[in-house]
Amino acid sequence: MKKNIDVVRAWRDEEYRNSLSEEERASLPQNPAGQAVVEDSVLTSITGGCGTPTTFVNSCVHYPEQCP
């Protein structure tokens, strides 16, 4: 029987996290808040930082293009 894992506790409580099996620790998310998803329409409304060689993931603006 698989036990329920308290993800928040696993991230905050090292002793609890260490009590989990290797398989259970591997099943924990890389970030306790989960993955952030930002729409391209939101990214295109952001200004600043376009003069540096930075590529934003899932953005329609990639270096060396200019911001719209």
Image (cartoon, grey):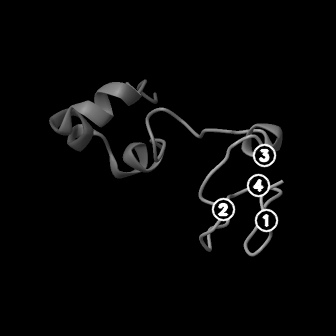
Q: Position of residue 53 (x, y in %)?
A: 62, 74
Mark 4 and mark 1: Cα distance apart in space:
16 Å
Q: Amino acid at mark 3?
A: Thr
Say what secondary structure mark 1 lies in.
Answer: loop
Asked where in the image residue 49 lies, by quadrant, the reply is bottom right
Mark 3 and mark 2: Cα distance apart in space:
11 Å
| Residues at circles 1 and 2 in contact by the CB criterion of under 8 Å | yes
**Dot 3: within a 10 Å radius of its alpha carbon, few (fewer than 14), some, or many (20 or more) residues?**
few
Q: Amino acid at mark 4?
A: Asn
| Residue at 15% over, 37% down | 15
**Dot 1: within a 10 Å radius of its alpha carbon, few (fewer than 14), some, or many (20 or more) residues?**
few
Name the residue carrying label 4. 58
Mark 3 and mark 4: Cα distance apart in space:
10 Å
**Dot 2: within a 10 Å radius of its alpha carbon, few (fewer than 14), some, or many (20 or more) residues?**
some
Q: Amino acid at mark 1?
A: Gln
Q: Is residue 37 left or right of residue 66?
A: left
In terms of depth relative to the viewer, which is nearer, 1 or 53?
53
> Disc 4 or disc 2, which is closer to the eye?
2
Q: Amino acid at mark 2?
A: Cys
| Residues at circles 3 and 4 in contact by the CB criterion of under 8 Å | no
In terms of depth relative to the viewer, which is nearer, 20 or 34?
34
Name the residue carrying label 1. 66
| Residue at 26% over, 39% down | 17
Mark 4 and mark 2: Cα distance apart in space:
15 Å
> Disc 3 or disc 4, which is closer to the eye?
3
Name the residue carrying label 2. 50
- Mark closest to the chain's N terminus, 3 or 4: 3
Name the residue carrying label 3. 44
- Mark closest to the chain's N terminus, 4 or 1: 4
Q: Position of residue 1 (x, y in %)?
A: 46, 28
Say what secondary structure mark 3 lies in.
Answer: loop
